[in-house]
């Protein structure tokens, strides 16, 4: 599974470029669906959001599509996705914690996000945008914790726009520099590794505290 995911990440630029050539503006709709699924549906925590955004920025530059429209469309997808995720957590979330692992939702992911949430509070909604798995479960846990929706929405909008704009514009500005294009696979891998650092750090700290107790 990990090998398949790794090769899928490396082939993302070719896949999106071919789609852009064949379907043009429909690329916006495809990426909207992926970002909405990763942020809004708790069962899709492993979609490659960070690397996807960077590569999307490089692709629209080559395909002649409007990067500003892309950022707007994907920001809406990210904000709507987190809002749906929050609603799911608010109304059905407590039941999930009392159930064993399922094919889609693992208690370990919930605990890891809870540790992250306990450390950073509401800002987890913003920081978590840049961390796989945390990105999917943070709004869910905010709903479970009954965070007031206006407060959640402010974090949601700030985090969503910052996440989408920073990575998409970075891809647009730097993705077609020859050195970056020639080393895109390594850069995508680097994005994945860097994005996992906060979650791994929090997990290790939680394990050390558990051992001490």
Image: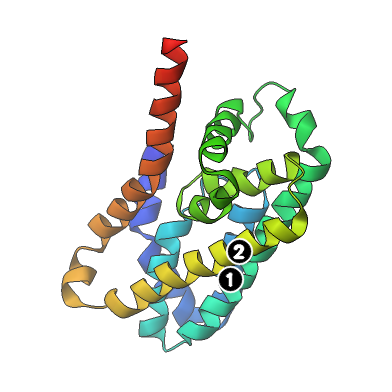
Depth order, front residue of 152/176: 152
Q: Are marks 2 and 1 in contact (CB under 8 Å)?
A: yes
Horizontal and vertical percent for residue 165?
A: 47, 72
- Is 162 above or below relative to 71? above
Where is residue 5 drawn, in percent x and y? 41, 45
- Residue at the left extreme of this rendering: 179
Report the number of discs: 2
Residue at point 33% right, 55% down? Answer: 191
Q: Circle 2 is placed at which residue position?
A: 78
Residue 145 is at least partly visible in this image: yes
Q: What's the colour scheme?
A: rainbow
**Mark 2: which secondary structure?**
helix
Examine the image and state in which quarter residue 23 appears: bottom right
The residue tagged 1 is 75
Front-most of 197 and 73? 197
Quarter of the N terminus within the rendering: top left
Q: Is residue 23 visible?
A: no
């Amino acid at each position: 599974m990990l090998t398949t995911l790794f090769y899928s990440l490396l082939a993302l630029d070719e896949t999106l470029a071919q789609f852009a050539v064949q379907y043009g503006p429909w690329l916006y709709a495809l990426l909207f669906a992926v970002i909405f699924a990763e942020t809004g549906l708790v069962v899709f925590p492993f979609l490659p959001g960070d690397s996807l955004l960077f590569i999307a920025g490089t692709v629209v530059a080559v395909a002649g599509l409007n990067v500003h429209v892309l950022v707007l469309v994907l920001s809406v997808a990210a904000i709507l996705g987190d809002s749906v995720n929050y609603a799911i957590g608010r109304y059905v979330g407590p039941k999930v914690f009392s159930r064993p692992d399922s094919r889609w939702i693992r208690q370990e992911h919930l605990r890891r996000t809870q540790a992250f949430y306990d450390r950073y509070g509401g800002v987890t909604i913003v920081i978590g945008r840049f961390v796989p798995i945390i990105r999917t479960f943070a709004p869910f846990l905010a709903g479970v914790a009954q965070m007031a929706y206006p407060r959640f929405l402010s974090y949601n909008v700030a985090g969503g726009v910052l996440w989408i704009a920073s990575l998409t514009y970075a891809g647009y500005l730097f993705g077609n520099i020859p050195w970056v294009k020639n080393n895109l696979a390594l850069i995508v891998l680097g994005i994945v590794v860097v994005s996992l650092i906060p979650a791994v750090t929090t997990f290790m700290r939680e394990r050390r505290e558990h051992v001490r107790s």
